[in-house]
Image: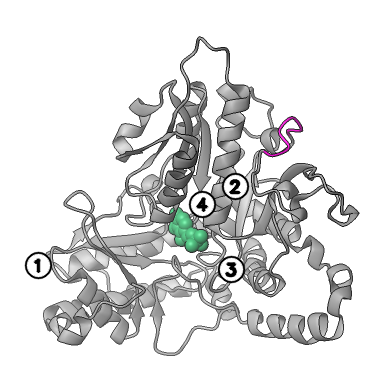
Amino acid sequence: MTTLQDCRAMDAQDPLRPLRAHFSLPDGVIYLDGNSLGVAPKAAAARVAEVVEQEWTQGLIRSWNDAGWVHLPQRLGDQLAPLIGAGPGEVVCTDTTSINLYKVLSAALNIVRADAPGVDTPARTKVLSERSNFPTDLYIAEGLCHERGLELVLLEPEDIAAALQDDVAVLMLTHVNYRTGAMHDMAAITAAAHARGIVCVWDLAHSAGAVPVDLHADGADFVEWRASKSADFAVGCGYKYLNGGPGAPAFVWVHPRHAGRTDLPFMQPLSGWFGHAAPFAFTPEYQPAAGIRRFLCGTQPILSLSALQCGLDVFGAAQALGGMAALRAKSLALTDLFIALVEERCAGHGLGLATPRAHGARGSQVCLTKDEGAYAIVQALIARGVIGDFRKGDGARHPDILRFGFTPLYLGFEDVWHAVEHLRQVLESAEWQRPEFKQINAVT
Ligand SMILES: *Cc1c(COP(=O)(O)O)cnc(C)c1O
């Protein structure tokens, strides 16, 4: 049996413990929802105030140059790049995940169309994804397929390998599943898809800052595309594990072999002026910037980007304490502890585990199932200051879920103990059956 003393001892030995001081955690809250909206870095309020009062109020239009606003999407992209195994000049922070997905999925389809071999080979008319992918990803793909007369095929994870056939244009997957926390083997799936001539788009919304990601799985070698296990396109979210603030700009990464293509000026269809080679030349014709900057569209949200920088800065501090490897080790220890404590202390209440036990297949969250009352239990926990969330199910294969995210930057092992103790009390007292906890909110 694990005890509260054991948890305190784990905190005492935690090399990442000092990072908690970089965040403003409200009193009386155990925050297990950093996978939905990360905690505010302490530096954010002062930084945004500085941008408003100095750079905007005093600097005015001059700040696009003097305060470096114009380069902020690339500068933050370079700061984020090491977290996802990307190189400098390969990432920009911009727009939303949904919008970036539209850009990269379109670009992937444009590449497939441009590179299609002769008329005798079967056309690539399918986009593959997972039935339990995050809905906005599926909606964007659905819209694009509708626009282009393609078919969106939704699969269960175990059926993906067999579906990688010559009629598939693009495989679009989310690395860590938002519902279950299950994690794909990105390099292996990418290699299998490339071998069949399929371009891969990865969503890193629940990966960036949470698990090590290696977009350049080939390493430094030049590998012919069909033999490559490096990804093609990736997008991800700024407001989850990166702690960039509500609605923070997202990011987009494109492998240089694609980003540098000069034969497809409209590879990225949202051909706005910030992605132009020379925005201030004001020429009437579009000419894309070289490299990743062509994935920008319009004028960038400087206040939001400034807040995102504060989130990314904490990962700079984490680097000195072991970086993503240390964060991953702690994340697995936190989720292992949560699973063990739930099984030891909450047995007999019909809870199931939707998250894989195998470390290699687990992101940084733990999801529990319960036949009845999942939503109300989450509400009862929130009333006690233990903030997780609820995700609606879709039949027996995808049940309702109580979702708990574990952010190793600021969570401690004692927090996990208390969270499970609250869960135990909510279940044993049947507190969750109170009517106020059954009231469904607009945002769950
Ligand atoms: C959170 C999340 C998004 C969010 O997209 P927005 O455009 O920021 O609303 C998209 N995809 C996945 C997989 C997510 O987890």
Was residue 249 drawn as part of the magenta stretch in this picture?
A: no
**What amino acid type is highlighted by mark number 3?**
Ala
Element type at mark 1: loop
| 4 or 1: tag closer to the N-terminus | 4
Q: In this view of the protein, which residue sits in the foreground, 368 or 64? A: 64
Establish whether ligand 1 lies closer than 8 Å to the Cβ of label 1: no
Element type at mark 2: helix
List x then y, in percent, for residue 395: 18, 53
Residue pushed farthest front?
Answer: 284
Residue at which label 1 appears = 348
**What amino acid type is highlighted by mark number 2?**
Lys
Q: Which residues are magenta?
A: 261-266
- In the image: residue 92, left or right of residue 345: right
Q: In this view of the protein, which residue sits in the foreground, 433 or 97? A: 97
Q: Main secondary structure of the magenta part?
A: loop
Kindly identify which numbered label has been placed on residue 248. 3
| 3 or 4: tag closer to the N-terminus | 4
Residue at which label 4 appears = 204
Mark 4 or 2, which is nearer the eye?
Answer: 2
